[in-house]
Amino acid sequence: MEKREATTVEIAETSRERKGKAPLLGAVDNAKAAGYKRGVAIFDLILRISAATATLAATITMGTTEQTLPFFTQFFQFQASYDDLPTFTFFVIAMSIVTGYLVLSVPFSVVSIARPLVAGPRLLLIVCDTLTVTLATSAAASSAAIVYLAHNGNSDANWLAICQQFNDFCQRISGAVVAAFVAVALLIFMVVLSALGLRKH
Amino acid sequence: MEKREATTVEIAETSRERKGKAPLLGAVDNAKAAGYKRGVAIFDLILRISAATATLAATITMGTTEQTLPFFTQFFQFQASYDDLPTFTFFVIAMSIVTGYLVLSVPFSVVSIARPLVAGPRLLLIVCDTLTVTLATSAAASSAAIVYLAHNGNSDANWLAICQQFNDFCQRISGAVVAAFVAVALLIFMVVLSALGLRKH
């Protein structure tokens, strides 16, 4: 519900006037709506912090991954690092942006808890959250495609699996992708919850 | 706003009673809210049909892509098809689901136009749209990662670009990915619009 507190009070007063209810009932209704919205906002804050933790973990895991093999030829030292693959660079950048947004959005979520009947911050959050879901999903999905390729290779395109050699590297990037998908799930839940919070008064 | 028409009329009556406005004003307010919501719903329907067209185009383009090279060795005939790469199979399946959902959701969008003040269908749509955005984004992003690899290869992982040989194949899959991203942009816009439609009464 998007009407401001004043309006809600007005409605409450009206039904009291018209139906001759006890004066307390309007205030009770209003407090109930505020309580529901506050509950949603608190849950939103918890999800937001969890998602921020997951994206931070994904960023750090991916960003610090490198592995040097213990043998080398005359020309090459075999080394794998996340920035060998542009997709993983995109992953790190996108996940950093998502983490930054989630941290910066915490104050707006707190405002929603403090003033549950004001719709402005909640609406801003739902729009930005939708964009963030898309960014996080694209980073997670594109990296997942590359991780799959690194594990399994593709005989038709003649791309060999590199995970036999770079086992440690592959495990870490897989972990980062899993953390990213956990964050995506939390973000989807957050958007749906915000939509429900907008609806019910 | 999610209150039913009846409630809105009640509010309108109240303000008339309290402020002594002309009797017509309440009905005008109500009609204005309905008009705004109907406009949003019509725009939503247009976006929905456009997105369905884009995802259908992406599905068909990807699903019918194959190229056989005009030379062969004793053991191989060089042929590329979308199902050589699991990511593209996922793309076709996910995009089919998204197209199906978008077509099936058109009636709900029509109900939103016919009854602009009822929040139920709109709320159902915003939740399902959010999930659909994620599915479409993951399909588009993972395929984009593979298309990039097909075009550019990766020297560190020793994956060669296959687009020199399979030029026609690469152009078609690139087109499908672009269509998928257009659909994603339309879907994001739809979710944001639905959120705004829920808010304003």
Image: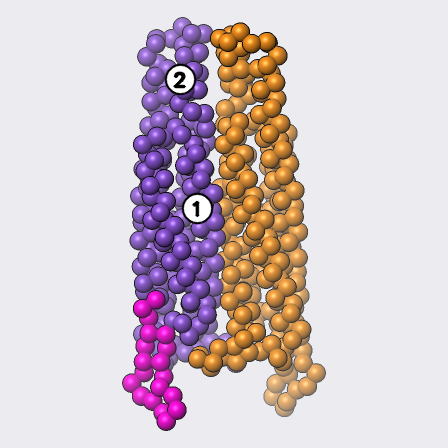
Chain colours: A purple, B orange
Residue A64 sits inside the magenta stretch: yes
Disc 1 or 2, which lies upstream in sequence? Answer: 2
| Disc number for residue B141 | none
- CA distance for labels 1 and 2: 30 Å
**Residue B133 seen in render:** yes
Residue that mark 1 sits on? A129
Amino acid beneath label 1: Asp
Residue that mark 2 sits on? A9
What kind of secondary structure does the magenta stretch mostly adopt? strand
The residue at 61%/40% (across/down) is B44
Tell me: residue A2, above or below residue A67: above
Tell me: residue B70, above or below residue A149: below
The residue at 63%/49% (across/down) is B52
- Place residue A3 in its image quadrant: top left
The quadrant of the picture occupied by the C terminus of chain A is top left
The residue at 39%/23% (across/down) is A5
What range is drawn magenta here? Answer: A63-81
The residue at 40%/72% (across/down) is A83
Which percent across, then down, holds residue B161? 55, 78
Number of numbered discs on residues: 2
Image-based side of B139 in relation to A57, left or right:
right
- Chain containing the residue with disc 1: A
The quadrant of the picture occupied by the N terminus of chain A is top left
Which percent across, then down, holds residue A23? 34, 9
Amino acid beneath label 2: Val
Between B111 and B187, the residue placed more toward the observer is B187
Which percent across, then down, holds residue B75? 60, 88
